[in-house]
Amino acid sequence: MLGIAHRVQELQYPAQALVVLAGIPGAGKTTLLRRLYPVGGEYDGVRVFDSERLRARWMPVLGVLPYAWWRPLLHLTYYVLVLTAMGRHKGPMVVHDCATRPWVRQLIGWRAKRAGLPVHLVLLDVPGDVARDGQWTRGRVVRAGSMATHCRRWPYLLEQATANPGRVVPGAASATILTRGQANQLTRIAFND
């Protein structure tokens, strides 16, 4: 099922759902999560995972080193935390991911299936130049080559989500595509029985 949002203030999912919040770097995923879940971690029974929050926790110790040196360890730790939580946490989850890495999408889909979690996608569709501006605003700019890869893969992901969300993340039941303006209007991601 695909939902292309027009004016939406609330997205609703089943109580046990795993929502993957996806978009290219700078699309506004972390900004949206901070607005909807200001505390992070677990918020009103929802487990929220954002690699940017993990990075902020590590900065006081590892920030003296170039980020490129410890980025792989950060990403590995983040995905281990997410995959472990998917097996342990029986409540709803929201996971931040760019979704442009096929191996990560496969891993999330595989783990969700094993844990019996229904998967739903929220895709922030933001043009590359707007996302790049967002990176400059947050003070962390993705390398040009890496950004080009994200931007090249993104239209194909949207096409796949439109045709069948399960092609993006295996087992995904729905995909909702939001522009940044629509994401700014979103006030809640609700999980209901």
Image (cartoon, rainbow, N blue to C red):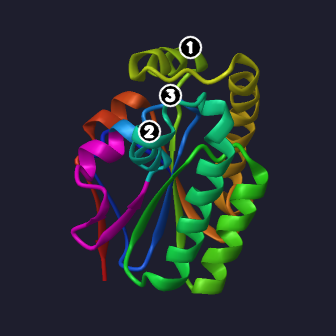
Task: Please rate how many residues cluster around mark 2, counting C-alpha atoms within 10 Å: few if below 14, some from 14 to 19, many from 20.
Answer: few
In front here: 125 or 40? 40
Q: In this picture, is 91 found above or below 7?
A: below
Spatial CA span between label 2 and label 1: 27 Å
Q: What kind of element bears circle 1?
A: helix
Residue at x-position 57% and y-position 86%? 116
> Mark 2 sits on what residue?
59
> Mark 3 sits on what residue?
26
Q: Upstream in the sequence, badge 2 or badge 1?
A: 2
Q: What kind of element bears circle 3?
A: loop
Residue 121 relative to residue 163: left or right: left
In the image, residue 10 lies at what x, y percent?
A: 27, 53
Q: Quadrant of residue 28?
A: top left
Spatial CA span between label 1 and label 3: 9 Å
Which contiguous range is marked in magenta? 32-49
Quadrant of the frame with the C terminus: bottom left
Task: Please rate how many residues cluster around mark 3, counting C-alpha atoms within 10 Å: few if below 14, some from 14 to 19, many from 20.
Answer: many
Residue at x-position 54% and y-position 66%? 82
> Mark 1 sits on what residue?
129
